[in-house]
Image: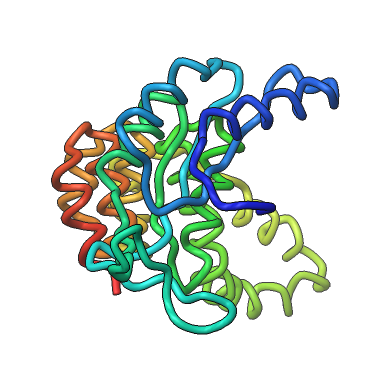
Amino acid sequence: MPSQGSRPDLALRRGIELLQQSGEPTGDLLFLTDGISDEALRRLLESHRSEYPVSVLGIGTAEGSPIPLAEGGFVQDNNGNIVVDKLDEQRLIKLAASAGGVYHRLTHDDRDIDYLLAAMKTGGSTESAAETLLTSDIWREEGPWLILPLLPLAAFAFRRGYLLVLMSLLLPMPETAQALEWRDLWLTPDQQAARILAEGSPEQAARRFEDAGWRSAAHYRAGQYQQSLAALNAID
C-alpha cells in the first residue's frame, strides 16, 4: 500500500471500477484484513453491489500482537502506546454475510484458500463449496484404495469372455438408502459432515464436523455467529 489508512469502502469502489473496466458484469472481491469499524462497515455496505460479492480472509488472532516496523520497533498510537492489533471476526463475519460472500480465517495450510475459491466458484454457496471440496477430498484420500480391488479383474480383462463381465461391474449402480449408508463407511467424519452441509443441513453438519474451520463455516451458514466465532478460536 502506498500509505497507511483504512477506507475499505473506497477500496471496494475501486475494485468494482476495475472489474467494470475489464468488461466483467460480475466478479468476486476479497478483503484481507484484521477488522473493520462500524462506520467503515456502514460505508462499505452502502457502496456494495449485489453482482460483486465480497468475501473476507481474516488475518491475525483474537489475542492480538504488536505491529512491527521495517526500521525496528512497533507501531505506536498518538500517546506513545504500542498498538496491539486484534482480529475482529464478529464484524468481518457480518460483512461477508451482508455482502453475499463468505468468511474464513487465515490458516497455516490451504484450507482457507480452498474454501474461499470453492465458495466463489459456486456463487458464495457454502453448501456447494462443501460438496466441491468433499469430492476432491474423497478422490485424493480414497481413490488409490478404490482402484486396488479392480486390479485382479483387469488381469482377466484380455481373456475371452471376461471383458463384458468386467464392463458390467464398472457400470454405475442406482443409489439407494442402503448404498448411501455403505458409502458413508468410506468417509471420514468431516467428509460425512461436508455431505450433510452440501445437502442443506448446516446445524446437523456443525455437530459432526471435527475440523474447527469447517465447523465454524457450518455454524456461520446456520446463522449461529457466536458458535462460529467459538469454533474459529479453536483453530491453532
State the residue at coordinates (63%, 52%).
Answer: 3
Expressed as whole percent of the image width and height from the top left, the position of residue 184 reads 32, 56
Expressed as whole percent of the image width and height from the top left, the position of residue 115 reads 49, 51
- Quadrant for the C terminus in the image: bottom left
State the residue at coordinates (52%, 18%).
Answer: 47
- Work out whether residue 104 or residue 37 is closer to the camera in this orientation and state it: 37
Expressed as whole percent of the image width and height from the top left, the position of residue 157 reads 76, 70
- Work out whether residue 64 or residue 80 is closer to the camera in this orientation and state it: 80
- Work out whether residue 211 or residue 38 is closer to the camera in this orientation and state it: 38
Q: Is residue 25 visible?
A: yes
21 relative to 60, above or below: above
71 relative to 147, above or below: below
Judged from this view, the residue extending furthest toward the front is 79
Position of residue 172 in the picture relative to residue 204 (left or right): right
- Work out whether residue 20 or residue 168 is closer to the camera in this orientation and state it: 20
Expressed as whole percent of the image width and height from the top left, the position of residue 202 reads 25, 38
Q: Choose top left, top right, bottom left or bottom right for residue 192.
A: bottom left
Position of residue 39 in the picture relative to residue 172 (left or right): left
State the residue at coordinates (29%, 39%).
Answer: 91
219 relative to 14, above or below: below
Position of residue 39 in the picture relative to residue 171 (left or right): left
Q: Is residue 189 visible?
A: no
Circle count = 0
3 relative to 81, above or below: above
Position of residue 87 in the picture relative to residue 6 (left or right): left
